[in-house]
Amino acid sequence: MRLKRSRFIPEKATKIEQKESNHVVYTYTNSHGQLCAIVYGGRRTKPDFQYSFPTEERRAAYIKKYLEDQLKRHRQTEERKALLKQQKKAELEKLQVGAIFHSSWGYEQTQCDFYQLIELKGQTGTFRQIAASTVPGSEGMDCDQRKAVKDKFIGEPFRKRLQGNRFNLESWKSASLVEDPENQSFYCSWYY
């Protein structure tokens, strides 16, 4: 059984909370008479910092700057998340049934798989694997360039949640939208 670690909160400490960035500061005087501060972020039990200060003014200034920086970071993160969400939504709105997706995978070789979107409901797409053809003249030693063959299904339908113009097949494998399936080819290699 694993013991749950708890936060160290000094006796007679003054609590300063910043709810937006989810940080809490405890100011206190230790047993040696030093002015100290300890800060925790989120649900962490390990402090972000625990320092002593020579004066009350230095402690207050340090805490103020630290909390301002954390708030700024928090707001930047939220802005990035909102922007990414908008981008994914815009990409999803552009998708149409019949769109082709490509996945490359392999170790010491590069396998090419293509999938076609056959149904779209909200963020959930129904896909089927489709065949690939070799681009004439691209053949090399154990390698070539491959293109998707639209509507030539070789797999059973499956459903996946789209993340913009891509989706995850496995924890190690994802597929991305092919912008120009008529002209775009992908490298494929193998070993016998």
Image (spheres, helix red, strand yellow):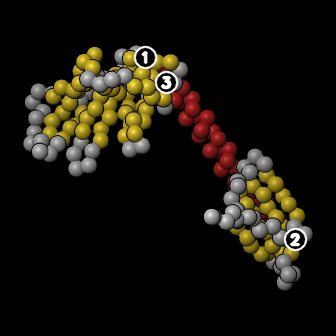
Q: Which residue is situated farthest in the bottom direction here?
A: 32
* Residue 56 point in image, percent of width and height: 86, 71
Q: Nearer the viewer, residue 25 or 151?
A: 151
Q: Residues within 10 Å of mark 3 (few under 14, many from 20)?
A: some
Quarter of the image holding residue 152? top left
The residue wearing badge 1 is 119
**Residue lying at 40% horizontally and 39% vertically, measured from the top left:** 170
The residue wearing badge 2 is 11
Mark 1 in CB contact with mark 2 (< 8 angstroms) = no
Q: Residues within 10 Å of mark 1 (few under 14, many from 20)?
A: some
Mark closer to the chain start, 2 or 3: 2
**Residue lying at 70% horizontally and 55% vertically, measured from the top left:** 43
Q: Which residue is situated farthest in the front direction here?
A: 1
Q: Residues within 10 Å of mark 2 (few under 14, many from 20)?
A: few
Question: Callout 3: helix, strand or loop?
Answer: strand
Q: Quadrant of the N terminus?
A: bottom right
Q: CA distance from mark 1 to mark 3?
A: 8 Å
Quarter of the image holding residue 66? bottom right
Task: Left or right? Give the position of 183 relative to 99.
Answer: left
Task: Indicate the amino acid at tag 2.
Answer: Glu
Quarter of the image holding residue 174? top left
Task: Indicate the amino acid at tag 3.
Answer: Thr
**Residue lying at 26% horizontally and 49% vertically, measured from the top left:** 107
* Residue 37 point in image, percent of width and height: 79, 69
The residue wearing badge 3 is 124
Mark closer to the chain start, 1 or 2: 2
Q: Quadrant of the C terminus?
A: top left
